[in-house]
Amino acid sequence: MAEKKSFLQEFKDFASKGNVVDLSVGVIVGGAFGTITKSMTDDLIMPIVSLFLGGINFSDWKLVLREASVAADGTEIAAVTINYGTFISTVINFIILAFVVFCLVKGLNTMRATTERKEKAAAEAAAAAKAKADAEAAEIAKLEAAEKAVQLKEHVAQLNSEQLLAEILLELKSK
């Protein structure tokens, strides 16, 4: 029967898994990157866009549903507004962030494809080199076999010559 783990031990096992840690780092870096993107939009891009549009500040664009007022007891009642200028800035932030993420993913995919192409080319080159070495080994084996056959023929011819000479000598002796 499986050992029952405590809630704390289960959480520790879950939190220490590589994917969870990687995801946590990604979320933290993504949050920081989002802050940088927001600052870039609010502090760099929107002032330039505002300059080209005649000094318009997008954060001032809003639809007032109810004006701010003062209650009978003297407390202020805040205005009710739809801040579509802020929404436009947020959409621009999103577009910039999406573009940067797209560029990062595209770069990573390009690097991965380049690595895969290099690995495939190396594997093909190794296979071609092995095939060439195998063909050369087969050729050498054929040449060695042919050389041995020639040597064997020469040996047989020599034996036949010696045998023939011995037979001739025997015939001459017997006569």
Image (cartoon, rainbow, N blue to C red):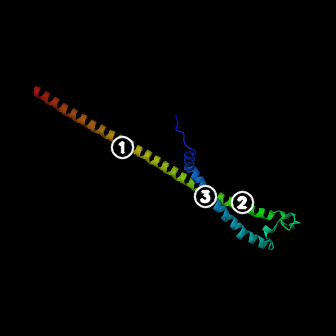
C-alpha separation, residue under disc 2 versus residue under disc 3: 20 Å
Label disc, if present, on residue 140 of the rendered structure: 1
- Of badges 1 and 2, nearer the viewer stands 2
- Which residue is situated farthest in the top direction here? 174
> Is 36 on the left or on the right of 158, as rendered?
right
Q: Residue at x 56, y 45 (%)?
A: 10
> In front of the other: label 2 or label 3?
2
| Residue extending furthest toward the right | 72
Q: Looking at the picture, how far across and down is residue 78, in whole percent?
A: 83, 65
Question: Which label's residue is closer to the chain start, 1 or 3?
Answer: 3
Q: Secondary structure at mark 2?
A: helix
Q: Are marks 1 and 2 in contact (CB under 8 Å)?
A: no
Q: Nearer the viewer, residue 146 or 39?
A: 39
| x and y percentages locating residue 147 in the rendered image | 31, 41
Residue 175 sits above or below residue 90 on the image: above
Which dot marks residue 107? 3
Residue at mark 1 to residue at mark 2: CA–CA distance: 68 Å
Return the x and y of residue 172 as percentages of the image width and height.
12, 29
Tell me, for residue 94, which label it has, or none: 2
Q: SS of the residue at dot 3?
A: helix
Residue at the location (54% across, 54% down)? 115
Check contact, mark 2 vs mark 3: CB within 8 A: no
Give the image location of residue 36, x and y in percent: 66, 65
Q: Nearer the viewer, residue 25 or 46?
A: 25
Residue type at mark 1: give it: Ile
Question: Which element carries disc 1, helix, strand or loop?
Answer: helix
* Mark 1 → mark 3, Cα distance in angstroms: 49 Å
Residue 158 appears in view: yes
Tag 2 or tag 1, which sits nearer the N-term? 2
